[in-house]
Image (spheres, rainbow, N blue to C red):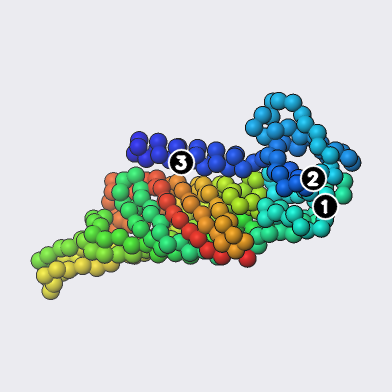
Amino acid sequence: MKHLSKFLLLFVSSIIMSAALHAQDKIYKTDGGIIEAKVKKVDPVTIVYKRFDNQDGPEYTILKKEVVKIVYQNGTADIFKGDGKNDDPESGAGHKSEKGKGAMSVKRKYGDNILSVIPGAYTVSADGTINDVGVGLCYERLLDKRGHIGFSLPVMMCFASSKDFNNYAYNYNSNGIAYTGNYHSFFFMPGIKFYPAGSNTNVRYSIGASLFCAFGGEPMGVFDYNSSSPTATYHYSMTGLMLSNSINISAARHLYMALDLAAGVPLSDNRHSNNDQSALDGLLAPFIQFGFKFGYRY
């Protein structure tokens, strides 16, 4: 568990640092150059900025006529030359900017809907009672114009085998018992995602909270006089809360990819059919979920 906690801390720190690296303003010049900066002021004739890699250093000034546009870290943009010849894919925000004189309306490059496939996900709990690999689908809808908030609904089918949760049922005159076997479950994880820098740049970080719901069946031993290898299936459900971190990549206008890491805690778990309280206490253990998805943004 200690190694798991260290890995989780390292992973979350790395994705937060990755997000910070993309939080700069960009000044696009008429000669094709790009200045990574922190814009301080936009005057009628000039633009005042500091270099992004030296924000404690001096302020610089550039004539507005030498600039095509400014794309700010939150995805909004000021355009000073509206002929469209120097438009850049990163100028994506679906509203009219209020920064700078003469700014024009900027069309959103990426759509508000994302439909993606989850080709691989792995969920594991601290006590080992969840150890499932799954596949699924995910739908996400951005809820605000600047792309900071989105609703996400992943649905997955998960598989595991040879599990023994010590569930059993009695039939009179038993001559055998069996616990193990294959089973599958379904995960539903509706939640809210927050993009600190907006969702209209190529690479962006998100953090979110979601409800974890699992439904499925597990093998259950049955004492039965008429069977030499008796088995049955116990149908169970789990609910919990999850905190997720994601690196979201728009490789092209419609191509979407993401790496997800979530940590959760079960709130209810009825996988133990014989109501043994000591066993029930062991089931409510925290878990971690890794996932990868790719899909279509429109």
The residue that disc 2 covers is 67
The quadrant of the picture occupied by the N terminus is top left
**Which of the two discs, 3 and 1, sits closer to the camera?**
1
Answer whether residue 179 is visible to the viewer in this image.
Answer: yes
Coordinates of residue 229 in the picture (x, y in percent):
14, 68
Residue 238 location, quadrant: bottom left
User: Is the residue under label 1 in contact with that under label 2 (CB below 8 Å)?
Assistant: yes
What residue is at 42 percent from the left and 51 percent from the top? 290
Tell me the number on the disc at residue 231. none
The residue that disc 1 covers is 81
What residue is at 69 percent from the left and 29 percent from the top? 55
Task: Specify whether 71 is left or right of 254.
Answer: right
**Which of the two discs, 3 and 2, sits closer to the camera?**
2
Q: Residue furthest front?
A: 31
In terms of secondary structure, where does tag 2 sit? Answer: strand
The quadrant of the picture occupied by the C terminus is bottom right
Q: Earlier in the sequence, mark 3 or mark 1?
A: 3
Coordinates of residue 18 in the picture (x, y in percent):
55, 41
How many numbered marks are there? Answer: 3
In terms of secondary structure, where does tag 1 sit? Answer: loop
Q: Give the CA separation, mark 3 to mark 2.
A: 38 Å
Q: Residues within 10 Å of mark 3 (few under 14, many from 20)?
A: few
Please name whichever residue, 233 or 38, is drawn nearer the observer in this view of the structure. Answer: 38
